[in-house]
Image (cartoon, rainbow, N blue to C red):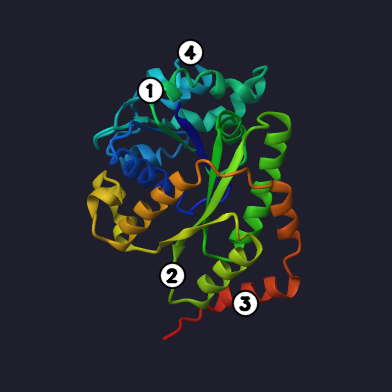
């Protein structure tokens, strides 16, 4: 039986879609059948794999129609990789879903035989904590949280973990927080080093060993309609995503990370240190 992961963070611009696309491509490269479901009305994952924004059926039809996720899947280009494309109609889903009884579980009901067909399914969530993201968290087995190496990522992580705790208590008690991956890391800046140190000091069991570097090859690959692991397979970004994919498999059998314990750790972050990080962000001091 395959696993279903939600790749989620309510903060935009943290490398969420890039992580979902490239983890999916890496997993597909090992001859596994992999499905990427784009749930973002910006259609970023869809475009990053060379598809248009008007493709049908889309994930909107799965959330608010009668199409199962498995039925809506189509080949995405790279061998063994499939996608359920997004559409701009998803922008209205946040308004439409709350009007439907039991809408929080609709995506779970519409997954269909994805676990039988695909060894890995990734749900690329929109940058919000609205009804679409809640649907994804209710449908998933596990969660990956990309966090940009910046100070505001710490505050965003607090908010996301609080929502995750609510989803686990009310909708999906079996949901496992697999880990946090640090993205867009510029090792030349003290800010990135400070944020990484804070995350690892407080959440040693939660943060992936792999760090995704800030890379022009990663940034430009969507314009070619390719994952970076195909666009520039020898780049630092490609190597990092391959390592992350391996580490993700290693964590498949891991015990659940306690959301309560992690949230408590975040609450204990020293206020003075947070102010120091904010000042560092403003200065963005680059080490020689």
Q: Is residue 125 visible?
A: no
What residue do we see at 67% from left, 17% from top?
Answer: 101
Q: Earlier in the sequence, mark 3 or mark 1?
A: 1
Q: Is residue 280 above or below residue 180?
A: below
Quadrant containing the C terminus is bottom left
Identify the residue at image location x=39%, y=42%: 44
Tell me the tag on residue 117. 1
First in sequence: mark 4 vs mark 1: 4
Instruction: Compute the Cα span from label 3 to label 1.
Output: 49 Å
Q: Position of residue 234 (x, y in %)?
A: 23, 59
Which residue is at the front of the view, 146 or 264? 264
As drawn, 197 above or below 237: below
Residue 21 found in image quarter: top left
Marks 2 and 1 sit apart, C-alpha to C-alpha, by 38 Å
Image coordinates for residue 87, horizontal then vertical, percent: 41, 30
Badge 4 or badge 2: first in the primary sequence? 4
According to the picture, the residue beneath numbered tag 4 turns out to be: 66
Residue that label 2 marks: 186
Residue at numbered disc 3 = 279
Residue farthest to the bottom, as pictured:
288
């Amino acid at each position: 039986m395959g696993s279903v992961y939600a790749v989620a963070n309510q903060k935009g611009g943290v490398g969420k879609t890039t992580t979902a696309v490239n983890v999916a491509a890496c997993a597909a490269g090992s001859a596994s059948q992999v499905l990427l479901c784009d749930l973002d009305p910006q259609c970023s994952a869809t475009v990053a794999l060379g598809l248009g924004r008007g493709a049908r059926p889309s994930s909107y039809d799965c959330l608010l129609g009668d199409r199962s996720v498995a039925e809506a899947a189509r080949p995405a280009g790279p061998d063994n990789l499939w996608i359920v494309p997004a559409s701009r109609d998803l922008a209205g889903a946040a308004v439409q879903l709350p009007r439907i009884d039991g809408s929080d579980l609709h995506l779970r009901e519409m997954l269909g035989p994805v676990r039988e067909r695909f060894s890995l399914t990734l749900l690329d969530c929109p940058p919000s904590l609205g009804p679409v993201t809640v649907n994804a968290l209710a449908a998933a087995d596990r969660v990956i949280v990309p966090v940009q190496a910046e100070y505001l990522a710490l505050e965003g992580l607090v908010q996301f973990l609080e929502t995750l705790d609510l989803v686990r208590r009310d909708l999906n008690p079996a949901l496992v927080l697999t880990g946090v991956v640090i993205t867009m890391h510029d090792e030349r800046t003290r800010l990135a080093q400070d944020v990484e140190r804070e995350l690892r000091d407080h959440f040693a069991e939660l943060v992936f060993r792999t760090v995704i570097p800030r890379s022009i090859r990663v940034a430009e690959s969507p314009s070619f309609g390719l994952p970076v692991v195909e666009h520039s397979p020898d780049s630092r970004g490609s190597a990092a995503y391959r390592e992350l994919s391996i580490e993700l498999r290693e964590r498949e059998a891991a015990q659940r990370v306690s959301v309560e314990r992690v949230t408590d750790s975040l609450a204990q972050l020293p206020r003075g240190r947070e102010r120091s990080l904010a000042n560092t962000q403003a200065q963005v001091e680059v080490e020689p």
